[in-house]
């Protein structure tokens, strides 16, 4: 192995110094991070993301991690002979699918994230929206009137359980399941959960990690910054489709409440640190519409 020179060590120290203003800016702030796409919690691709999250906690930030488990849920549906169906990027969730979702999210994906964070030297606690309850939801119908089954929209957030975990110096790991007023568990889109938590916790940033570089325009060009009006137009014009629709809507929701929202490529190693601790971020940043 080549011997590390003093210049190499000095450069590493300089990188830390360059990050200092950003560490100071976000120290004590809540950051809501949604893990998804190619950085699935059950895969090795999540390692650099979770390392980033542990580091952010140790330098004084208060990260909240929200996760789904779409690929895993689909795989289990197919194992038992159920065909996954989606409307506008939302999974149609009948009773058997709801049971699978609970099993995957709270029995496999969530515990895997918590275990890995603890192995990395952090301290995490897993919960779902049913615990507390943290997320009270109402049934959702698709835009075109299609029935989605046990799919919910967040109607009320009880942030006390999550704030309590944060105050203990731990990292909350939240599964995207909510409790209906009827006592039924509901599948809630994880991007939407992350946005509602960001609003309720007065988070400084909402970061949606996915498996694309960000939001693209009609010509396929990456958009580095977009306001909520333009983002809505991208959906209505059919430029943003499928699973990107809930992400863009979640980012709009957070941005219009004053929380800086970002959609970034979680496949890029340490993309969280690049977004938060460097001058040139990655992906797409959402802002609210400025009115005079």
Image (cartoon, rainbow, N blue to C red):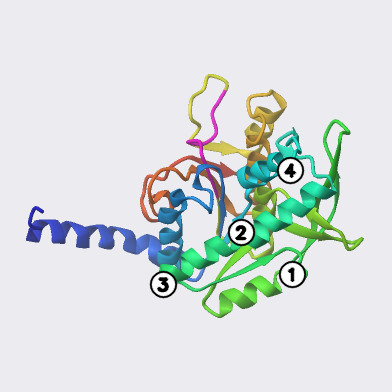
Q: Which residues are magenta?
A: 208-217
In the foreground, 244 or 187: 187
Marks 4 and 3 sit apart, C-alpha to C-alpha, by 37 Å
Mark 1 Cα shell of 10 Å, populated few (<14), some (14-19), many (≥20): some
Marks 2 and 4 sit apart, C-alpha to C-alpha, by 17 Å
Please state if 269 lies on the left or on the right of 233 as rendered: left
Magenta-drawn stretch contains 269? no
Q: Nearer the viewer, mark 1 or mark 4?
A: 4
View extreme (right): residue: 182
View extreme (front): residue: 80
Which callout, 3 or 2, points at the residue further toward the start of the chain? 2
Residue 188, relative to residue 81: is it above or below? below
Marks 3 and 2 sit apart, C-alpha to C-alpha, by 20 Å
Point 80% across, 44% down: residue: 93
Q: Secondary structure at mark 1?
A: loop
Q: Secondary structure at mark 3?
A: loop
Marks 3 and 1 sit apart, C-alpha to C-alpha, by 25 Å
Q: Which residue is mark 4?
A: 80
Place residue 76 in its image quadrant.
Answer: top right
Q: Nearer the viewer, mark 2 or mark 4?
A: 4
Which callout, 4 or 3, points at the residue further toward the start of the chain? 4
Point 41% across, 59% down: residue: 52
Mark 2 Cα shell of 10 Å, populated few (<14), some (14-19), many (≥20): some
Mark 3 Cα shell of 10 Å, populated few (<14), some (14-19), many (≥20): few
Percent of width and height locating residue 270:
39, 51
Point 68% across, 74% down: residue: 161
Q: Which residue is mark 2?
A: 108
């Amino acid at each position: 192995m080549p011997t590390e020179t003093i210049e190499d060590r000095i450069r590493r120290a300089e990188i830390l110094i360059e990050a200092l203003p950003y560490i100071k800016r976000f120290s004590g702030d809540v950051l809501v991070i949604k893990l998804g796409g190619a950085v699935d919690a059950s895969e090795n691709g999540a390692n650099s993301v979770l390392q980033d999250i542990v580091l952010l906690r140790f330098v004084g930030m208060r990260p909240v991690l929200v996760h789904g488990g779409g690929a895993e849920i689909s795989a289990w549906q197919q194992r038992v002979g159920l065909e996954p169906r989606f409307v506008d990027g939302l999974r149609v969730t009948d009773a058997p699918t709801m049971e699978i979702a609970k099993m995957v999210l709270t029995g496999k994906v969530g515990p895997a994230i918590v275990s890995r964070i603890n192995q990395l030297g952090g301290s995490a606690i897993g919960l779902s929206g049913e615990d507390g309850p943290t997320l009270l939801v109402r049934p959702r119908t698709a835009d075109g009137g299609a029935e989605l089954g046990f799919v919910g929209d967040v109607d009320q957030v009880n942030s006390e359980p999550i704030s309590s975990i944060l105050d203990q110096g731990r990292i909350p790991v939240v599964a995207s399941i909510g409790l209906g007023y009827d006592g039924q568990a509901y599948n809630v889109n994880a991007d939407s959960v992350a946005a509602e938590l960001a609003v309720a916790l007065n988070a400084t940033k909402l970061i949606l990690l996915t498996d694309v570089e960000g939001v693209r325009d009609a010509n396929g060009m990456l958009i580095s910054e977009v306001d909520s009006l333009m983002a809505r137009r991208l959906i209505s014009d059919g430029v943003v489709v499928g699973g990107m629709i809930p992400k863009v809507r979640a980012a709009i929701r957070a941005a219009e409440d004053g929380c800086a929202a970002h959609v970034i490529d979680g496949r890029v190693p340490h993309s969280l640190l690049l977004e938060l601790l460097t001058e040139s971020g990655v992906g797409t940043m959402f802002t609210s519409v400025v009115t005079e």
